[in-house]
Image: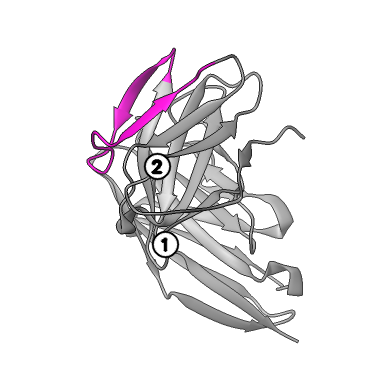
Amino acid sequence: EPEVTQTPSHQVTQMGQEVILRCVPISNHLYFYWYRQILGQKVEFLVSFYNNEISEKSEIFDDQFSVERPDGSNFTLKIRSTKLEDSAMYFCASTRQGGNSPLHFGNGTRLTVT
Amino acid sequence: AQSVTQLGSHVSVSEGALVLLRCNYSSSVPPYLFWYVQYPNQGLQLLLKYTSAATLVKGINGFEAEFKKSETSFHLTKPSAHMSDAAEYFCAVTSNDYKLSFGAGTTVTVRA
């Protein structure tokens, strides 16, 4: 069965550095998402992306975050200047249709900011 | 806005016993409800979904959930727990706006 793949599985970075988290969604999917889970807290929506633009973003997704689909397969999340509180597990997800279609999640990237 | 509340952050059951995980939702519009499971070091895997068809929804691995509008609940059950069911379980809700709101999760441990 096709999977959403995320790389790296674990990223350690220093505060203030830029990081790019990479995702390869399932190939025929059209809607893409990023979620994050801070240790011990709920999984939170960050952003949804469709037709090469952001369809919705949460209040967490401020100017230091950006998303891009640079080619036909990758979907990236960039954090421009990381803060300690950005440490979390970041999940990429995709779905063929939007709305109530179930999301297919990747295994996540654990980001540790020191 | 929608939200879900999962009652009990940790549930411990004996192998072969009933698994019951509670989820209550809040939504101003008809909700779509999901249960996801997360095994250690893995992503979120869909167990089952409710999208306004049958109120009793059967999912993978022997799990099922019943949508009860009068109780605003969507509890997850499995008649007989297996060791492989040890994982974290998340209830989630959306209203067709592409955005899932997750509960805090319930960790299930299974005793031999």
Separation of marks 1 and 2 at Cα, in angstroms: 15 Å
Q: Report the front residue among A10 and B48.
A: A10
What is the quadrant of residue B83 in the picture?
Answer: bottom right
Q: Report the front residue among B45 and A44.
A: A44
Q: Is mark 1 on a helix, strand or loop?
A: strand
Residue at horizontal 31 percent and vertical 58 percent from the top: A85
The numbered dot on residue B23 is: 1
Q: What residue type is labelled 1?
A: Cys
Q: Can residue B31 be seen in this view?
A: no
Residue B38 drawn at (x, y percent): 59, 58
Residue A77 drawn at (x, y percent): 44, 34
Q: Report the front residue among A76 and A97.
A: A76
User: N-terminal of the two: label 1 or label 2?
Assistant: 1
Question: Mark 1 — on which chain does it sit?
Answer: B
Q: What residue type is labelled 2?
A: Leu
In this rendering, is residue A102 above or below A74? Answer: below
Residue at horizontal 39 percent and vertical 40 percent from the top: A18
The numbered dot on residue A39 is: none
In this rendering, is residue A63 above or below A11? Answer: above
Q: Is residue A13 one of those drawn in magenta? A: no
In the image, the segment drawn in magenta is A50-70
Residue A45 drawn at (x, y percent): 36, 43
Instruction: Identify residue for label 2.
Output: B100
Q: Report the front residue among B75 and B107.
A: B107
In this rendering, is residue A33 above or below A37? Answer: above
| Labels 1 and 2 touching (C-beta < 8 A) | no
